[in-house]
Amino acid sequence: MPFGMTVPQVGQFSKLLLGRWRILTIELECDVYSIQLNFTFHSETNSGLNPVSNPDTQEESKLKIPIDQIFPDPDLPRSKKPNGRRENTRSVRSKRDPVVLSTANGYLLLAGGRKLTAAKEAGEILVECTVKEEVTEQERWELSLAEQYHSSLVPAMELGKAFMEYRDTHEVTQQELARRTGITPGTIHHYESLIRTLDPGLGEKVNSGELTFKEARSIADIEDHVRQREIAQPFIEGRLSSVHVERIVGRAKTSASLTIEDIIDEVVNGKRAPEREPEPVAIIQPALPVEADTALIENAVLRIAGELDVMQLQVIPEYRRLKLISSLRILDSRLKSALLNLNGGVAVASAVPRQFAASKVKV
C-alpha cells in the first residue's frame, strides 16, 4: 500500500480497486521492519463471503468463513454414542480444514466437523475452509466416508459396510479408495475384515461398544468363530485390557491345542503353558475287496434255468401261477442289477417273463 496511508484510507483504497467488494475484517501484523495487513472481503451484492474471482479461478479455494454461515450436511449420519462398557471411538484426530460447498444460503459442511467444533468451542468467529463450487455425487460420497471415519460418526461395523458398498458400486480397490479419502489402505482392510471374517455376534458387541475396534480387528484374524468368541469373552467382561489382545491372538493361532485360559495366563502372568499332544485321529481303513466264489451262483442259475424249461410243459394251478409270477419278477430285477454291475454299463431292458395260459398239456 502507499506509504503513510491510515487504516480507513486503506479500506477506501481497496474499495476503489475492487468495485463491489468491501473489507469485512483487517488483521494487522507488524514488526520493526514491516507492516502486513490481511484482508477478508465481503461482497455487497451477495450475502455470502467469496474470494476475489477471475476467469482462471479453480473450483476449489481457501477462505476464512464466519462459522455461523456454515451448516451441517443433512445426509451425513449423526454421531452415535455406544452405551456399552466403553466407547468405540477412533483415536485419529483429523487436522484438515473443513471442506464446504458454496450454496445460495451459505456453506454446506462436507468434511472437517472436528476442526469446526474446536473453533466454536474456542470462541472463534471465522474458520479457514476449503471451498468447493461444485462436487459430484461420487466426490460427496468419498468426503462423507472420510468424515465418518475421522469424526467417529458411525460404529466400526457400519463403516466397514460403507467401505465395501462404495468399492462394490464404483469397482475400485482398497488402494484407490485410500487415495480418494486419505484413509490408509491397511485401515480400510481392517474395517472390511470385520464384515468378512468376524463372528456376527461379536460384530454386535463392537457396535454396542462392549468390544473395541482394536480387539475386534485382532480377533478377526482367527478363522474359527468358536475360538473367536472364547478369546473375546474376557475382553467383553472387562477382565483383560486391549494391550494384550494381539499377543493372545498370535499365541492362539500357533497353539490350537491350548485353552484360552492357559494362553491368557501365559501372556499376562508369564507362565509358559505346556503344549498338549493332539488327540490321535482314528484312521478308517477302506475295506479290501474279496474275490467272489461264482461257482455256487453258476450252478444255481443252471438249475433254475432247467426247471423253468420244464415248467412250461406242466399245468400250473391259478393260485400258484400268480405267486410264481411275483417271484420271477423279483428274480428278473436281481438279474438286471447283477448284469449292470458286471457289464459296467446300463443293462439292456428285457421284457417281463411271458405268462402262459392255464391249459392242459399232455405229459
Image (cartoon, grey):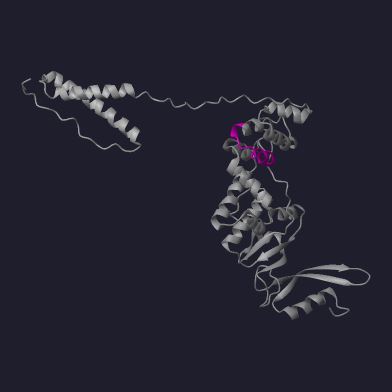
The C terminus appears in which quarter of the rendering?
Answer: top left
**x then y, percent, for residue 60:** 67, 68
**x then y, percent, for residue 339:** 31, 32
Q: Residue 238 sits in which quadrant?
A: top right
Q: Is residue 222 magenta?
A: yes
**x then y, percent, for residue 330:** 25, 25
> Residue 261 versus residue 72: which sits nearer the camera?
261
Q: Residue 157 sits in which quadrant?
A: top right
Magenta-highlighted stretch: main secondary structure? Answer: helix
Residue 32 visible within the image: yes
Residue drawn at the location 84% of the way across and 68% of the way down: 28
> Residue 360 versus residue 259: which sits nearer the camera?
360
The boundaries of the magenta stretch are: 213-226
227 left or right, relative to 246: left
Q: Is residue 119 above or below residue 243?
A: below
> Residue 266 versus residue 162: which sits nearer the camera?
266
Residue drawn at the location 66% of the way across and 41% of the way down: 217
Q: Is residue 209 magenta?
A: no
Residue 155 visible within the image: no
Q: Residue 251 sits in which quadrant?
A: top right
The N terminus appears in which quarter of the rendering?
Answer: bottom right
